[in-house]
Every structure is written in structure tokens, then in C-alpha cells.
Image (spheres, grey):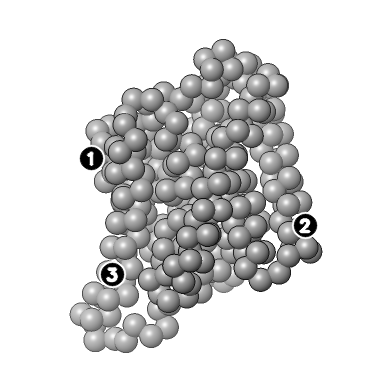
Amino acid sequence: MTDLSVSVSVLGAVVLLSEASRRAAARLFRGAYWIYLLEAASTFQLCCCTHELKLLGETAQLEPPVSLALTYTMTVIHLITFRGASCNATGALESVCRGRSGFRAAFVLIACQFGAAVAAQFFAASVWSLGLSDIHLRHQRFGFRCFDPLGGTVLEAAAVELACGFIIQAAGLHVHKLDEKLRAPFIAAVITALVYMGGRVSGAVFNPVLAFSVQFPCSGHTYLEYCFIYWLGPVLGVSSCILLFEKIVPFLSGKSTIGLDVPAAQKQKTQ
């Protein structure tokens, strides 16, 4: 339980640090700068917490109910504290396709996300180097190395990431139909279920930025294979979901697509 207590403390410290950054940015900056800093702070929080949860899950041998409870709880906290930040490159690309954002703004947003993802790698390594728990010490002895994250073939992992991207996008498109208080718990439940079902095959990341921070440093596969799995898979999943629910289904039913463009604030997508 000592390892679990230390990891939970690390998670709490990361959330508090990121929240302090968001509040400071909200007071000091306005407009586009605030949006970029919000994405950076939230992406940093997401990646740091996922690094710690992944290490805890792989080395502490927690019971599945405990692991899933941690995943669900942290996802709810992320959704509540992110204040509309997507922390996901597919969200920025979707905004461009819908005409809500320009290419330059989307590029800067994605750059902020990837910058925060890299910063999270260094932050996680710095925390682990302190040796606060046995799992941190063991990870330090291995040089913070990450081993093959796949439990299947490259095609199987890509298919899982595509399916996860499709499902979470579908949930995001329809979550506005629920009461506002139920939206975060619902999305968190969907994400937790996806992690449980697809985690053993690909890790069930379905987020290109998060995968770049957590999965890409792992050995076992080439950079291009990871790009195929963790970048192309989720993008195709999100794209196919939008095409199905906003083009094909309305066309077959004879309904207009007006009103299907759900505000981004109601469609937060994270793992």
C-alpha cells in the first residue's frame, strides 16, 4: 500500500500544480494566449498522471478493481479541471475541419500540447529519480526504460486504437443529451471501459499527444509503427465517427445535419 499511497500523492501534487498554473494563466493572460496555456497545463497534467498510473499498473500488480477505480477517478478529475481543453491533437484537427479554428491556431495549439507532453516526460523522470517508493527505485535502476507496450500485433493494436477513437468520439457527440452533472462521469466511465477492454492490446491510449509522451519512448517497435498505431488509428476512428453520425446517418434518414455540431466544451476527449 506504500507504493499506492506515494503514487496517489504524486497524482494529487500534479493536479494541484497544474491547477495553480491554469489559475495563474487565467489571471495574467487573455484570449488566445490563455487557450494555449490552458491546453499546455492540462496536457501536462494528463501526461504526468498517465506516466505514474502506467508505472503503478505495470509494476505494483494492483487488483483490477483498484486499477479501474484509479483510472475512473483520475479521468473524472481531468474532465472537471481541464475547463474545456481537449489535450488531444484530433480535437484541434476537428476544429479546423469544422471551420471553428484556422490552420495557424491549430498548429500552435498542437505544438503546445506536444511541448507539454515532452515536459511531462522530464517531470516524471525527475519525480521517479527521488526514489519515493519501491516502484520508483526499481524503475530508476532500469534507467526509466519502457518496454514493448503492445499485447498484440501492430494491426491489432491499430484496430483497437481506431475503435477506441470511434467510440469516445461517438460518446462526445451525444453526451450533450445528458444532464450537465452526468457528462463527466459518463465520459469517464466510457474511457475506463475502453482502457479495460483494449489496454492489454495497445494500452488504449486513443490520443496522439498522450501516446507520444507515454508509449513512443518504449522499445519493441519502430517510430513509424507507433505513428501508425497511435496517430493514424485514432484519427481514422474520429473521422469515421464524424462521417457516420453527421453525414451517412442523416443522409439515410433524410434529416439535416444542422445542430449536430456540438460545442467543443461539451466534447472533452482524454485517457
Indicate the amino acid at tag 2: Ala
- Whole-angstrom CA distance, mark 1 to mark 3, is 22 Å
Between discs 2 and 3, the one toward the N terminus: 2
Instruction: Label 2, secondary structure: give it.
Output: helix
Image location (x, y in percent) of residue 107:
47, 60
Please, what secondary structure does the residue beneath circle 3 have? helix
Q: Is residue 138 left or right of residue 147?
A: right
Query: What amino acid is at disc 3?
Result: Leu
Picture residue at 48% right of the left edge, 72% below the top: 101
Counting residues from the start of the chain, the first of labels 1 and 3 encountered is 1
Marking on residue 194: none
Counting from the top left corner in percent of width and height, residue 262 is at 46, 75
Q: At label 1, which amino acid type do we have?
A: Leu
Residue 25 in sight: yes
Looking at the image, can residue 189 be seen? no
Residue at 69%, 48% (x, y): give it: 18
Q: Nearer the viewer, residue 265 or 116?
A: 116
- Dividing the picture into quadrants, the one containing residue 152 is top left
Residue 265, given in percent of the width and then of the height, sits at: 56, 69
Which residue bears the numbered disc 1?
Answer: 155
From this view, report whether residue 79 is shown above or below residue 116.
below
| Residue identifier under label 2 | 24
- Give the number of the mark in front: 1 or 2: 2
Residue 142: x percent and y percent? Answer: 52, 15
Extreme-top residue of the structure: 141
Gap in Å between the C-alphas at discs 2 and 3?
Answer: 39 Å
Q: Residues within 10 Å of mark 2 (few under 14, many from 20)?
A: few
- Asked whether 241 or 216 is in front, the reply is 216
Residue that appears at 59% across and 70% down? 180
